[in-house]
Amino acid sequence: MNDMVRKTTAAALSLLLVHLPGSPLAAQPQMPEPATEKALTLHEYLQKSYVDLFNVAPSLSFSSADVMQERQALERGEKDCRDRFKEHSKSYGKQLDAARGELKKSAKSLTDDQRHVLHCRIQNLELLKSESDVLTGQAIPNAYDNLNAKLDLLLQWPAQEKLARADLQSGAYLQRRWSDVKDIGFREIASGQRDDIKRGQEAVDELKQAGMLPPEVENKAIQQYVKGIADRVAQHSDLKIPLHVTVLQSREINAFALPGGYLYIERGLLEAAEDEAQLAGVIAHEIAHDTARHSAKLMKRATIAGIFYQAAQLAAILLTGGVAGIGLYYALQYGYYGLGLVLNLKLLGITRDYELEADQLGIQYAWNAGYDTTGFTRFFDKMATKEGYVNGVSWFRTHPPFYQRMVDAQREMMFLPEHGMETVQTSEFEAMKKELAPIAAEAEKEEVGKPSLLMTKEEGCTPPKKLEYKPGQPIEAICLAPMRDVTGEAQQ
């Protein structure tokens, strides 16, 4: 099997996804920064970052009518957009049935060229239908989950902040789980970390043998830089085993941790991070998964169909950022969503508690290592609000509600003592970015036109010239886009 470049669907979305009748999305440009916060409407606030909203929410007030109107607009916007792509999926399904019927009816009389054309048509229709299904089932709902979370934050954070400050004043915050941050490195989060080393090494070996790991980035400076950040965080964490760090040549924006201290950072994450604190925050979150032994606990429960370490199970286990689908970025470009690789992680025993635990511990580790503790939440916000990556769906779909996650993180940051000079950006990070740019550009050239590495039924097909979603495109831009046919042309 060729080297696998794994991509996951992911929903990180930039602007507000409300589109009311007679109000096209193009008529909702991003507003310039106002002179005062009071100049913004509730609708416009939902385009701000979580960090900004935490700061301004206590000084704002909106009427119940404003809130109700916004809730209803969000509800209508999500329904309209999802209904649109449900219809697209249905239309592609009918075309698929017709093409398959033609293939069956004419099977004996078709020339090889005619059969190839028909096979390619079926293949591309499967892609388009699968794309619509993923948008309907994951990307669009994630966009609206994000917007509703911001609305909840504006309404509920002022009261939550008062409670947090009261806990600080009374000392009640010291009763929270893992409040003993002065003992990081000496406390035990979960016993048995050393027992995970063998299991993790076996998983790595199986992944490599199956061709499921992308190749490593062949740049010593980048590998050493990322390893240095991870080592700095690990030394200020509760990890009690050696850390093995590898940067993978994959444009997916993700990182994952295997049991036993095996940490993988994907190239796309380095490209997406804006400063060293963001990168350190994500790495700290993944290290926290290992200190709490989440991956090991999940692997014990992975017995789908009685087959351990199957590709789909591994994908779901490994991508601790969320729902997994190996090679799903290629699937977006030229392949298949319907391979059983996007799983409901409840089948594997994954709980929301694991993500909340990793958030809390990761924030503590980044803090203890001297980093700006907002790094992880700022990166989360970038994925959820600004990027518009469908290959960021994996960050969100099986995670706790956005609101709960952001508020719990904000409270933890409030409860940590101030260091005074937290690291946000470094010259080493900027040097890494310069080293990475030509490597990423070359990799992009090599990936153009490649078929799915998972399953290509018919070689030599011309993929659709334009799918309905383009990586980097805000989701709202597709809600009113025309449906495409197998050639990429817009349908009437």
Image (cartoon, helix red, strand yellow):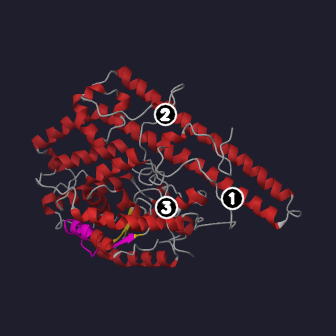
From what the image shows, is residue 52 above or below residue 260?
above
Q: Amino acid type of disc 2?
A: Ala
Judge by depth and name the residue closer to the eye, 303 or 475: 475
Label annotation for residue 123: 1
Residue 273 pos. (x, y %): 33, 57
Q: Earlier in the sequence, mark 3 or mark 2?
A: 3
Q: Residue furthest right?
A: 109
Mark 2 or mark 1: which is in front? 2
Q: Where is residue 285 shown, x and y percent of the image?
A: 30, 59
**Disc marking residue 7:** 3
* Image quadrant where one finds the N terminus: bottom right
Q: Residue 485: x, y in percent?
A: 68, 47
Name the residue: 51% across, 47% down.
138
Residue at which label 2 appears: 26
Confirm whether residue 173 shows in the render.
yes
Q: Residues within 10 Å of mark 3 (few under 14, many from 20)?
A: many
Q: Is residue 93 left or right of residue 440?
A: right
Is the C-beta separation of discs 3 and 1 under 8 Å? no
Q: CA distance from mark 3 to mark 1?
A: 19 Å
Q: Could you tell me how far apart the alpha carbons at marks 3 and 2 are, in whole angstroms?
A: 30 Å
Q: Is residue 257 above or below residue 89?
A: below
Specify whether residue 243 is painted magenta: yes
Q: Earlier in the sequence, mark 3 or mark 1?
A: 3
Q: Is residue 144 magenta?
A: no
Q: Secondary structure under badge 3?
A: loop
Image quarter in which the C terminus is found: top right
Which residues are drawn in magenta? 228-247
- The image quadrant of residue 331 is bottom right
Give the residue at x 47% y 62%: 316
**Number of the front mark, 3 or 2:** 2
Query: As drawn, is 413 to the left or to the right of 128?
Result: left
Residue drawn at 81 percent across, 67 percent down: 112
